[in-house]
Image: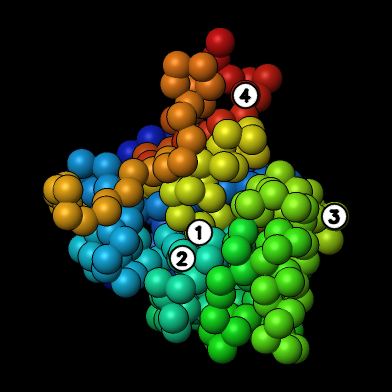
């Protein structure tokens, strides 16, 4: 893969100690503070981030971009925990949400980065599900994984006998409480939390004011929409405008061919322009 090109300077703060291979491929340094909750998405030119009828639709939307897979791996390599929703889990039956799975060519460099950051070899995978509808045989659901659900969801999982991952009930509601989920992860020492959950979980996190940064790959494809196929935008299940708009600031812009790698911040810093 040829290196990504930086077009707009990274204004996110002190740079991480990236191995040389990763800094070269990323096109420069990566600043990623802590504590931080950051999300990663790829979107088509017309704003589609997921196609419900298409397993692993992110690959289709990205045009199988090698650079997009690299950035995904880099962001996973920096994370203490990776949050996914049950829809994302079920649509990715073989995913482990590890850096080396996203971009195998940089596996050794990703492992070295985690050592430099003082992280365990693999991030904790935390699955948010209100209903508890997850496949217990999914390879990501090992003893170190978490299933964060409701009281009803926990009861449903218990009916099937011993569950391979730790199950935590966050409350009595119909959906898993995003704020409680983040609070639990923070309480367990997970400073950098990466959300790779879908638009409904992302909408809940944004609505609760929990998202610090968004990494958004803009892919040069048009997905289109019709009444026959459910195609989702970045935020689903929540209305933000006109009452609760989430204003972002542009932090960083990079390019690889016709793909743009945009980074936005949602938290104001004292040094930001008014």
Instruction: Specify few, some or many for label 4: CA neighbours under 10 Å numbering under 14, 14-19, or 20 or more.
Output: few
- For the point 33% across and 70% down, the residue is 56
Q: If you read the primary sequence from the N terminus, does the residue marked by circle 1 or circle 2 appear first? A: 2
16 or 258, nearer to the observer: 258
Q: How is the image coloured?
A: rainbow
Q: In the rendered image, which residue does mark 3 sit on?
A: 187
Q: If you read the primary sequence from the N terminus, does the residue marked by circle 1 or circle 4 appear first? A: 1
Q: If you read the primary sequence from the N terminus, does the residue marked by circle 3 or circle 4 appear first? A: 3
Instruction: Specify few, some or many for label 1: CA neighbours under 10 Å numbering under 14, 14-19, or 20 or more.
Output: many
Q: Secondary structure at mark 3?
A: helix
Between the residue at mark 1 and the residue at mark 2, the CA separation in whole angstroms equals 8 Å
Q: Secondary structure at mark 4?
A: loop
- For the point 56% across and 37% down, the residue is 206
Specify whether residue 18 is in view: no
C-beta proximity under 8 Å, tags 2 and 3: no
Q: Secondary structure at mark 2?
A: helix
Does residue 108 appear left or right of residue 16 in this picture? left
Between the residue at mark 2 and the residue at mark 4, the CA separation in whole angstroms equals 30 Å
Which disc, if any, is residue 88? 2
Q: In the rendered image, which residue does mark 4 sit on?
A: 268
């Amino acid at each position: 893969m040829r290196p990504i090109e930086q077009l707009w300077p990274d204004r996110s703060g002190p740079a991480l100690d990236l191995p040389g291979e990763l800094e070269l491929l990323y096109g420069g340094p990566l600043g990623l503070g802590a504590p931080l909750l950051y999300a990663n998405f790829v979107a088509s030119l017309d704003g589609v981030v997921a196609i419900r009828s298409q397993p692993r639709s992110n690959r289709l939307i990205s045009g199988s971009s090698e650079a997009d897979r690299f950035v995904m791996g880099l962001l996973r390599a920096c994370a203490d925990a990776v949050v996914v929703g049950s829809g994302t889990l079920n649509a990715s039956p073989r995913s482990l949400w590890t850096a080396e799975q996203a971009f195998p060519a940089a596996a050794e460099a990703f492992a070295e980065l985690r050592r430099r950051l003082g992280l365990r070899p693999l991030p904790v995978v935390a699955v948010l599900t209100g209903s508890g509808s997850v496949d217990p045989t999914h390879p990501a659901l090992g003893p170190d994984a978490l299933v964060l659900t409701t009281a009803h969801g926990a009861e449903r999982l218990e009916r099937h006998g011993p569950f391979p991952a730790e199950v935590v009930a966050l409350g009595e509601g119909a959906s898993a409480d995003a704020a409680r989920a983040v609070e639990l992860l923070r309480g367990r020492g997970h400073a950098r939390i990466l959300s790779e959950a879908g638009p409904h979980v992302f909408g809940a996190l944004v609505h609760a004011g929990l998202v610090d940064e968004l990494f958004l790959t803009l892919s040069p494809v048009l997905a289109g929409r019709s009444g026959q196929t459910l195609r989702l935008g970045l935020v689903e299940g929540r209305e933000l405008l006109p009452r609760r708009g989430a204003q972002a600031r542009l932090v960083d812009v990079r390019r690889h061919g016709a793909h743009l790698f945009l980074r936005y911040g949602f938290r104001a810093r004292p040094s930001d322009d008014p």
